[in-house]
Image (cartoon, helix red, strand yellow):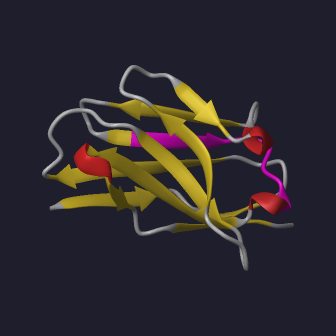
Amino acid sequence: QVQLVESGGGLVQPGGSLRLSCTASGRVFGIWPMAWYRQPPGEQREFIAGIYPNGETKYQDSVKGRFAISRDNNKKMVFLQMNSLKPEDTAVYYCNIKMAGSVEHWGQGLQVTVSS
């Protein structure tokens, strides 16, 4: 009943920028915490940024000062602005929404490759 669709991934050179978008649709009533996770090749999925309905944000230390999460509650969207990208940022990026009863939904995943 809930779908998250991501867009904006791709190939970028080190030091470059990308902006990821995620749109929620279906039975999403109200405003819920949303977040971005990533899974580097051969590694576990990890939390990188989250945002609460009131706009409060959290970041993994490795992306603080480089990434910025934001949301548009009216459009039910969450964004991840990624600046000063490094090769170690290469991963599949997933958006997430946490709803009532600890129910979570995930986006389809976007490949972000940082390489020269």
- Quadrant of image for the N terminus: bottom left
Image location of residue 31, percent across then percent down: 26, 33
> Could you tell me which residue is drawn at 55 percent across and 43 percent down?
80
* Residue closest to the eye, 114 or 54: 54
**Among the 4 quarters of the image, the one containing residue 91:** bottom right
Image location of residue 70, percent across then percent down: 48, 32
Question: Is 90 placed above or below 56 here?
Answer: below
Q: Is residue 86 magenta?
A: yes
> Could you tell me which residue is drawn at 70 percent across and 69 percent down?
40
- Quadrant of image for the C terminus: bottom right
* Residue closest to the eye, 28 or 20: 28
**Among the 4 quarters of the image, the one containing residue 49:** top right
> Could you tell me which residue is drawn at 83 percent across and 48 percent down?
15
Q: Is residue 112 visible?
A: no
- In the image, 27: left or right of 107? left
Question: Is 51 placed above or below 62 here?
Answer: above
Question: Is 107 placed above or below 28 here?
Answer: below
Q: Is residue 81 magenta?
A: yes
> Could you tell me which residue is drawn at 25 percent across and 48 percent down?
101
- In the image, 29: left or right of 101? left
Residue lying at the far front in this picture: please name it: 101
- In the image, 73: left or right of 88? left
Q: Is residue 58 visible?
A: yes
Q: Which residues are magenta?
A: 78-87
Image location of residue 24, percent across then percent down: 28, 50
Q: How many marks?
A: 0
Image location of residue 27, percent across then percent down: 13, 51
